[in-house]
């Protein structure tokens, strides 16, 4: 994989993690996680967050590809796009493997150094 491709992938992952770093946006992702399309009205039910704020958060999620908007008559419905989450999970698993390998090397170094 070329350096440019790796850097572009890293940038996309960072944007997804940044979007998920907000409690309201993370809540929206969890709500949409069942695959059921929801309107802004449905997404604001039982919440202290205004429709306008939910709309802004949905746009952030849409910009990073986590959410898709579709029209149903005059209403906008939102669905979760799991692909960026899958990529983020892959990135986290890769980092976990790197840490595991580093800990094995450290353990080996400490045990051999005695």
Image (tube, grey):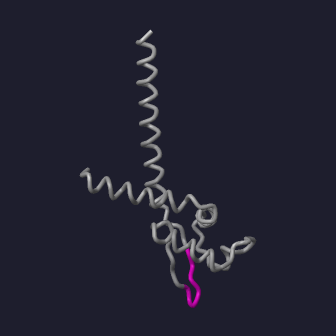
Residue 85: where, in percent of width, then height? 49, 57
Quadrant showing the C terminus: top left
The main secondary structure of the magenta stretch is: strand
The reply to whether the magenta stretch includes residue 113 is no
- Closest to the observer, 88 or 60: 60
Q: Residue at x 72, y 74 (%)?
A: 45
Residue reaching furthest bottom?
A: 74
Instruction: Tell me if residue 61 comes above or below residue 108 in the rendering.
Output: below
Q: Residue at x 36, y 56 (%)?
A: 9
Is residue 49 toward the left or the right of residue 87 in the image? right
Residue 100: where, in percent of width, then height? 46, 32
Instruction: Tell me if residue 90 comes above or below residue 101 in the rendering.
Output: below
Q: Residue at x 60, y 70 (%)?
A: 36
Residue reaching furthest left?
A: 2
Q: How many marks?
A: 0
Is residue 27 toward the left or the right of residue 100 in the image? right
- Closest to the observer, 40 or 106: 106
Q: Residue at x 56, y 73 (%)?
A: 58
Q: Please tell me in which quadrant of the rendered image residue 7 appears.
A: bottom left
Is residue 42 toward the left or the right of residue 84 in the image? right
Q: Which residues are magenta?
A: 72-78
Residue reaching furthest top?
A: 114
Residue 113: where, in percent of width, then height? 41, 12
Q: Please tell me in which quadrant of the rendered image residue 20 appears.
A: bottom right
């Amino acid at each position: 994989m070329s350096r440019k491709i790796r850097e572009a992938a890293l940038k996309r992952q960072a944007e997804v993690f940044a979007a998920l770093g907000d409690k309201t946006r993370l809540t929206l992702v969890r709500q949409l996680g069942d695959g059921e399309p929801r309107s802004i009205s449905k997404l604001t039910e039982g919440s202290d967050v205004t429709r306008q704020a939910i709309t802004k958060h949905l746009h952030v999620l849409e910009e990073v590809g986590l959410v898709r908007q579709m029209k149903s008559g005059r209403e906008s419905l939102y669905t979760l796009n799991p692909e960026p989450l899958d990529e983020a999970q892959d990135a986290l698993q890769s980092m976990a493997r790197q840490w595991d390998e580093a800990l094995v090397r450290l353990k080996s170094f400490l045990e051999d150094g005695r």
